[in-house]
Image: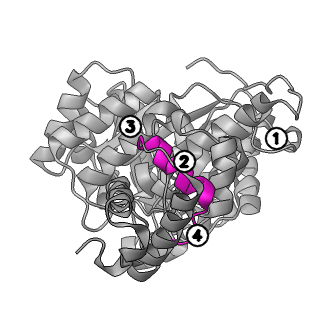
Amino acid sequence: MAKRRFPRRKRLDVDDEDYYRTYTTLYDEVIPRIGDLNVVDTTCRDGEQMPGVSFTVEEKLEIARRLDEIGVEQLETFATYNDSDRESARLIAAEGLSISLMGWTRPVAEEIEDSIMNNVDAVAISIATSEIHLKHKLKMKRREMMEKMFSAIELAKSHGVYVCFNAEDGTRTHLKDLLAFVKAGKEAGADRFRLCDTIGVLTPASTRYLVDSIWKEVDIDIELHAHNDFGISIANALAAAEVSEKFPDRPIWVSTTINNLGERAGNVSLEALMLNLKRHYGITKYKTEKLFPLCKFVEQASMVKIAPNQPVAGENIFRHKSGIHQDGVIKNPLTYEVFTPEEIGTHRTIALGKHSGRAAIKYKMEELGFESNDEEIEVLRHLVTKISEERKSPLTDDEFGHLVLRVRSRGAHSISPWKTYE
């Protein structure tokens, strides 16, 4: 891949609306630039390790197609272990997509060869490196672990594939031991090192320290595989990306999952990462307008519902209920939306509920094709407030339209909110 640095965008007048369509804050100039960044999405591997999630062959194939359309550089999946994994890998490879296909394996010769036989062009070989894992899980000495890993790297490279070697629980590994691991992997011929924050213990400061420390010692591509146990995985990913500015010849890779799927609290959210890259850092190489449809597809395939207040893909991002917010958004969406619904492939909704004001009632009536007058708007506002408070949810467009018709046919003062939908 061609190495590039992402330049700052041309400065705009802060009084110009185009400014707010391009920037997130008045202080973008203090945000560090980043070097060459690539994304490896692991929804079909780590995402599927989430309890209750299981993708069919057809669903994995569709996820691969959609990631390719967005411009994601690599997809990670299981390519061994069962017939469904193998078939998924073969079918994705047969699609002829631009996206690289990486198979995840342990440092076991049979697994590596099996994965490569199913037509992946890259493998991620993973082993734990922390003392607690070596002692209690692997029951293995550090030297034995390293010998096992690096024999595996040499085997994979002999097949001509791209090799990433992973330090599971690498962020709880002593730095001297971690550096020895990375140096040995580089010497064995690996192309990329994956720093796994397996239980999400990093902070942005410790992320910067680790990535910087590794790059000062070893000339190798680094990937951050961050988990979200403390809710800051995306902040850690962006911190790692910012370090890459100091090393412009070495790409930083970020591991993501769609909808924040993954073990425990999940991984770095693909959709949130891409909106941050676009709006904070000026990286526009990804087709973000295809994100929302992908998120909804994965929601259905995974049977894990997207929380309404989830960043980027949650329905409340463009669903406004407060009267003050509704009034502002109706006058100019930029007052309460930092990016547009079109940027992620969705639309805006004015939700009529307990705190909706006259402006929202009038807007919704006009949107649904009703003429309005001040007296009717005020009557409807009170009814909407009462109904939504009692049932603890806003009215749908169909329900509101029905309410308007009932007000007009029966007279506002004869309608009981409780009986409106009986």
Residue at 58% x, 25% y is 285
Whether residue 236 appears in this view of the structure is no
Viewer-nearest of labels 3 and 4?
4
Mark 4: secondary structure: loop
C-alpha distance separating marks 3 and 4: 44 Å
Q: Is residue 366 magenta?
A: yes
The quarter holding residue 387 reads bottom left
The quarter holding residue 187 reads top right
Residue tagged 3: 75
- Mark toward the start of the polypeptide (3 vs 4): 3
Residue 60, position as x, y percentages in the image: 24, 41
- Mark toward the start of the polypeptide (1 vs 3): 1
Q: Amino acid at mark 4?
A: His
- Mark toward the start of the polypeptide (4 vs 2): 4
Residue tagged 1: 32
Q: Position of 342 compared to 160: left or right?
A: right
In this view of the protein, which residue sits in the foreground, 323 or 297?
323
User: Over which residues does the magenta segment extend?
Assistant: 354-369
Residue tagged 2: 363
Q: Is most of the magenta stretch helix, strand or loop? A: helix
Q: Amino acid at mark 1?
A: Pro
* Crowdedness near tag 1: few (<14), some (14–19) or many (≥20) residues, C-alpha within 10 Å: some
- Mark toward the start of the polypeptide (1 vs 4): 1
Residue tagged 4: 355
C-alpha distance separating marks 4 and 2: 15 Å
Mark 3: secondary structure: strand
Contact, mark 1 vs mark 4 (Cβ under 8 Å)? no
Contact, mark 1 vs mark 3 (Cβ under 8 Å)? no
* Crowdedness near tag 2: few (<14), some (14–19) or many (≥20) residues, C-alpha within 10 Å: some
Residue 405, position as x, y percentages in the image: 33, 56
C-alpha distance separating marks 2 and 3: 44 Å
- Mark toward the start of the polypeptide (2 vs 1): 1
